[in-house]
Image (cartoon, rainbow, N blue to C red):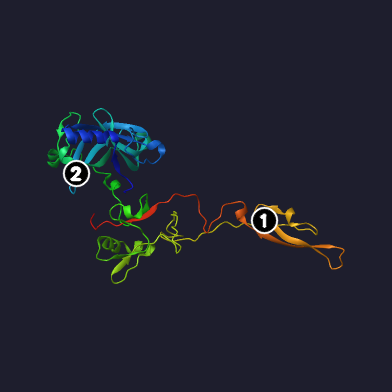
Amino acid sequence: MPDFYTVVTDTGLQALGLASAQGQSFSLTHAVVGDGNGLAVIPNKGMTALVNEVWRGEVAGVKVDSDDSNTFTFEFAIPADVGGFTIREVGLLDESGKLFCIGNFPETGKPVAVNGSVRDLVVRLPLHFENADDVSLVIDTAVAIATKQDVKNGMDALTQRIIDACWTMPAGHIYPVPFPPDELPPHHYVPNGEGLLKTSDAGKTLLSMSAAYKAAHRVIENETHVFMPNVFDENGDGYFPRFVDGGSRSVGSTQGDAIRNITGQMLMQHGETKNDYENGALFATGESLSGATGTSTILRSGLGLDVSRIVPTSHENRPKNYGFIPAIYLPPLGV
């Protein structure tokens, strides 16, 4: 699934059901944006409102995607004098003010004059309908029905398109996804070093990546195959992602596991036993022996270290974590 996407809410699905089964139209007259209360938003169909709405206004236009006639793009503009917030969520409202759909949004600042910058902001919100032929959409404040054919005839009220790239993912993007390996979204593959046929769509895309990308992620090839990046070690354990500066440490470089050094010391005196020195991970080992003359006691002693006595241990160092499948996005060239 892309990083940024839109879902139809339960309320929206009900409206779509009536539109399809009973020939009813529904209005999508207003758009809303929110700041997510400072956090990224994960859309779900059970939502009835944005996490934190900061602005709403009229939908200005809608058009059909040139490659998919069931996908509509709704457009609206946030005026220059509105702002002082960061957009992280967007949605469309029906004529009764109910939330029809909600999408997450890349953090986009909307400044005002006091921030030293003034600009209109045009937002484009794509939305897919499975049976668009059965749907009549009311998208303007005059409540004039805009059918699919009307839209195809060129209904496009806005000329600015400054957020087009926010809804696409670049080829070669590697990121965690919450799906089993056999349920990955289209054009996604597990980056485990396996080979792709050079003649396949994914293979052609991987071959088209820059020389710097292929070098950083150790993408190699032979006569017939090109081999994907590998985010697993020899034991099958996945690497945790970590930010690098691209200078002292490069993209795609790996590090083995390590811990900070643990030190300690113990003072032993004649006649003392190991039970006198048990403190955390450090403990004494030894036994008392009679001296050669039989008149003195000698302590044979040692020092042991076992951090499992005080912390959980495993074959690797790791924080608490939640399992995701790594995926690399390799769409056909030109998609």
Left or right, 319 with respect to 187, comes to right
Choose top left, top right, bottom left or bottom right for residue 208. Answer: bottom left
Can residue 79 be seen here? The reply is no
Choose top left, top right, bottom left or bottom right for residue 17. Answer: top left
The residue that appears at 75% across and 61% down in the rendered structure is 287
From the viewer's perspective, is residue 189 above or below residue 96? below
- What residue does disc 1 label? 282
- What residue does disc 2 label? 70
Q: Nearer the viewer, residue 163 or 44?
A: 44
Amino acid at circle 2:
Asn
- Residue 10 locus on image (x, y percent): 29, 35
Is there a contact, CB below 8 Å, between mark 2 and mark 1?
Answer: no
Instruction: Tell me the SS state at disc 1.
Output: strand
Left or right, 41 with respect to 273, comes to left
Q: Nearer the viewer, residue 68 or 234?
A: 234
The residue that appears at 15% across and 31% down in the rendered structure is 144
Amino acid at circle 1:
Leu
For marks 2 and 1 on the same chain, the one whose residue lies earlier in the sequence:
2
- Residue 96 locus on image (x, y percent): 25, 27
Left or right, 331 with respect to 251, comes to left
The residue that appears at 18% across and 41% down in the rendered structure is 131
Choose top left, top right, bottom left or bottom right for residue 253. Answer: bottom left
Instruction: Tell me the SS state at disc 2.
Output: loop
